[in-house]
Image (tube, grey):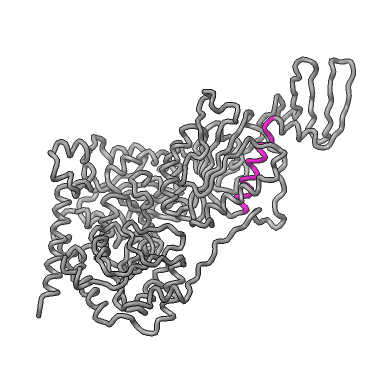
Amino acid sequence: MAGRESMDGHTTGTGTEENPRAAIDTGGAGEVAIDTGGAGEVAIDTGGAAEVAIDTEGAAQAAIDTEGGAQAAFAATLVDEWVRAGLSEAVIAPGSRSTPLALALAEDGRLRLHIRLDERAAGFLALGLSRATGRATVVVTTSGTASAELHPAVAEADLAGVPMVVCTADRPPELQGVGAPQTMNQTGLYGSAARWAMAVAVPERSQDGMWRSLAARSVAEAEAGPSGPGPVHLNLAFRDPLVARPGPMPPGRSDGRPWHHVSRPVLGATPADVAAVAGGPGRGVLVVGAGAGDPDAVHEAATALGWPVLADPRSGARTPGPATVAAADAILRDPHAHDRLRPEVVVHLGERWTSRALADWLRQPGVRHVLVDPDWRWRDPDRLAATVLRTDPTALCRAVAETVPEPLAGPEWRTTWTSAEAAAQAAVATALAGRGELTEPRVARTLFDALPTEATLVVGSSMPIRDLEWFAAPRHRPPAVLANRGVNGIDGTIATALGVAVGRGPVAVLLGDLSFLHDAGALLGAAETSEVSCTLVVVDNHGGGIFSFLPQASRLPADTFELLFGTPQAADVCTVAAAYGARVVRAADEGELRAALKEQVGSPGVSMIHLRTDRAANVAVHDRTHRTVARALAELWAPR
């Protein structure tokens, strides 16, 4: 937990902790000395002519409020209400205008504090913490461009459905629009990416009846809003003096609960929902991704229906079993699979796969698509869904398993899929094991197989997430797999992983050299703490490997392609990592990679396993592996 930083010695006016009499200059006419030592006496010296003693309850507090105590009390109230709502983590990017809220968080001590110099890294660290804990994380910045630096993390949190309470400090109204430093229009800064936004005026005592409601609602909107979890934005105006001793907070609920407690509705499956899945033709598939619900429930539904499960590693359902299909991308690249494995109904659970081969196969005409979409996210870019079910995927799968009396498809339907899966997995294993050096598909496959169950695998965008999806084989008790696939950017991968490591436990990160360099600043200070265990597995192909798979690679001159898309960097990633204090080891083959993972994953601090690959060779190994799978399927499906 965060240490409590004492606020003793903070001054109000010219008073000090040793002499708590705040002197207020009244323009030379006299001096008002306020004794806050417990007597509550206000002595007014009118130039020596007379002394009038006024004993009034609350006068001392009123004077403190005029010196910033009201906004200090406001900030303390927000923190207390967030604690009542169950929040436990806060990320602060240092700055002056956010002083009242930063001090309140430090003085309260009940939220664990994480200090990051770079606001963009702070935003993604908060995102990772929220992914790990399932609860909103508070993130605080000062005014100006600091608040804009959070926008990438806010955009990702919005589209990925991750709760965050984003607090940006702002200048008071009198400093807006007049060229004051570090001042810009921050109202509505994040646009539609914020689930809910509120621009809060400089706190005044006359408005303290709304303070607890504001804080409690920010959590409710972030975690239980009608569009599902996501970021909320509080733009908080503060006026000098920014350092003040807080006055009393408005009382909270006597039972210790938050001012507003909002629970998400339980979206149970109805008979109509079950009929939408199981009431039609018999040959179907479950396509499952992140957020698909409980993996056991998914497989129970598949067993009841007699359907295969096309399981993305992020779903948690890529486990050995008679319904699991992990090599869907490789299988569905074969044109013969389109007819042989043509479904009549497809049920989509959770987020989409990255596979274009799967997407092309799903676009076949005459297939009925059912989209399970509890948060109304409308993840259907090809506009295939005939039916959209706003129900919890776990509840739906369990209802299907309990309701369907016998499989809808004959045994030959699932057998065709499982035979193709077995042939494809054997072909992939042969193709990738046939060469001594590490290839990028082999790295992804090894990582998914070798990590301990209690670890979390964070996967970067671009090729790492694709290689994991396409080539990782099913395994028992797989590690949790997370990826920033809301906006699908490469930014913030390291900061997100560090947040997951702080909130959940040991983390391994699969990313490329450009993703590493893009977010290397997130390592600042991370290697100096033992509270994280984060191992970066960096596949270094000296540039942007995914572009070698795109038409630009074949249609442009090589030097133009390298300049605009390959973008090799002069920086040495091992040197950069070591400069931030990370332990660096190198691996040249699968044995060395497995040994390094065993040694580093779970060890305190930040480490990097560096793997050298070649972009052109990487394209070749992908092509060779897909050809090997195609030959295996041709043999499997050859007329007997």
Q: Is residue 634 left or right of residue 510?
A: left
Q: Residue at x 24, y 64 (%)?
A: 361
Q: How many marks?
A: 0
Judge left or right: residue 18 versus residue 528: right
The percent position of residue 25, horizontal first and vertical second, equals: 74, 20
Residue at image coords 71%, 38%: 205
The reply, left or right, for residue 569 in relation to residue 454 is left
Considering the image in quadrants, where does the C terminus appear?
A: bottom left
- Residue stretch in magenta: 67-84
Front one among 621 and 375 = 375
Q: Position of residue 18 (x, y in %)?
A: 73, 29
Q: Is residue 124 visible?
A: no
Residue at x-position 55% and y-position 42%: 234
- Residue 611 shows in this picture: yes
Let me know if residue 80 is in the magenta part. yes
Please state the horizontal and vertical placement of residue 403, each as a whole percent of the image. Answer: 43, 81
